[in-house]
Image (tube, helix red, strand yellow):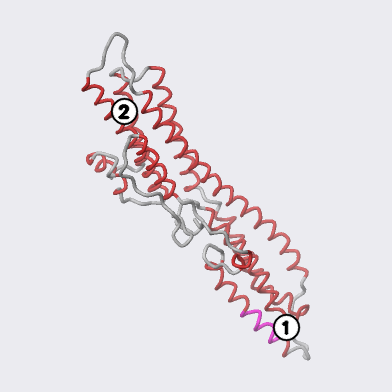
Amino acid sequence: MMVPKQHSWLRLIFRYRGTELPRTKWRIAGVVLLACGVTAAELMLEDTQFHTDLHPLPFTLVGIALSIFLGFRNSSAYDRWWEGRKLWGSLINTTRSMARQVLTLISEVPEGRTLSSAEKKEITTLQTELVRRIIAFTHALRLSLRDIDDLKDLEPFLPKDEIEALKTETNKPSAISKGTADRIQVAWSKGWIHPLHVGILEQSLVTLTDIQGACERIKSTPIPMTYTTLIHRIVAVYCYGLPFGVVSEVGALTPIVVLVVSYAFFGLDTIGDEIEQPFGYDDNDLPLDQMSRLIEVNLRQRIGETDLPPLLKPVDEYLS
């Protein structure tokens, strides 16, 4: 995601990276070249009975409808982007809460019994393992949303045999959650968790699963192709036909008018494409690497670790 520094209004006007221009520049250039050709032909043929212009009324009517459709589509795409950001914000909060629950609720001493030093050490080991599994879940969710099969980011947090087992899993975050639930069940059977507290930990796991499912819904259900294709086609036909519709009215200024209008329509069309899927690597997609690293650092601090990776910062104003 682009995280621009505080720039002046003028610098924002001429900004290139993180804008729609990398995707639309060649489309706009093609329309402007066509407009130059149509303008030249119109000026050369203005004294003859042949003309290249059309009546501008159809372009006015189509332009109004197209603006409405583009606004609706971009609003839908932004809703998907913003929902994705809210889900990852909820993930940050839930992982912090669950880590706190693990460190405070898994220590129950059964009535009339004193824990041995070995058992206390075992509980501490279990707490550390569970917190690290929460971190592993976060990284696994990020990898899943970005269709990355490399599990090296999970190796510091899970046993080697589990890493190998995950390679055959189709839903790796879900498999990690199942392993976490199994360990909570074992802790409960040993009397290390009060029965009333088991439900609290289980609810945190349910919340993590709900977040995962909502993210997967956004990823696997794009805006219907028929709607997107229709918008692309109408924008293309409108922009490439525009020179013929305005040349009789604006004459030699046709290329400039076409440049402004096509920039607006191609730009609006492209914005919807870029933010429709918020979990990728486009300039304006969500910074999943940064948020995953934030969760990792926060949770590892809770279990007393000090050899922590640095929080990710923008590089050339880009945050991955």
Name which of mark 2 and mark 1 comes first in the sequence. Answer: 2
Left or right: where 208 falls relative to 124: right
Residue that badge 1 annotates: 252
Q: Position of residue 126 (x, y in %)?
A: 28, 29
Say whether residue 47 is magenta. Answer: no
Label 1 Cα crowd, 10 Å radius (few <14 / some 14-19 / many 20+)? some
Amino acid beneath label 1: Ala
Looking at the image, residue 225 sits to the left or right of residue 51; the answer is: left
Q: Main secondary structure of the magenta part?
A: helix
Which structural element holds mark 1? helix
Q: Relative to residue 298, is residue 110 drawn left or right?
A: left
**Quarter assignment of residue 229:** bottom right
177 to 291, vertically: above or below? above
> Magenta stretch?
33-41
Is 276 drawn above or below residue 248 in the view shown?
Answer: above
Q: Which residue is mark 2?
A: 182
Residue that lies at the very extreme toward the top in this rendered image:
112
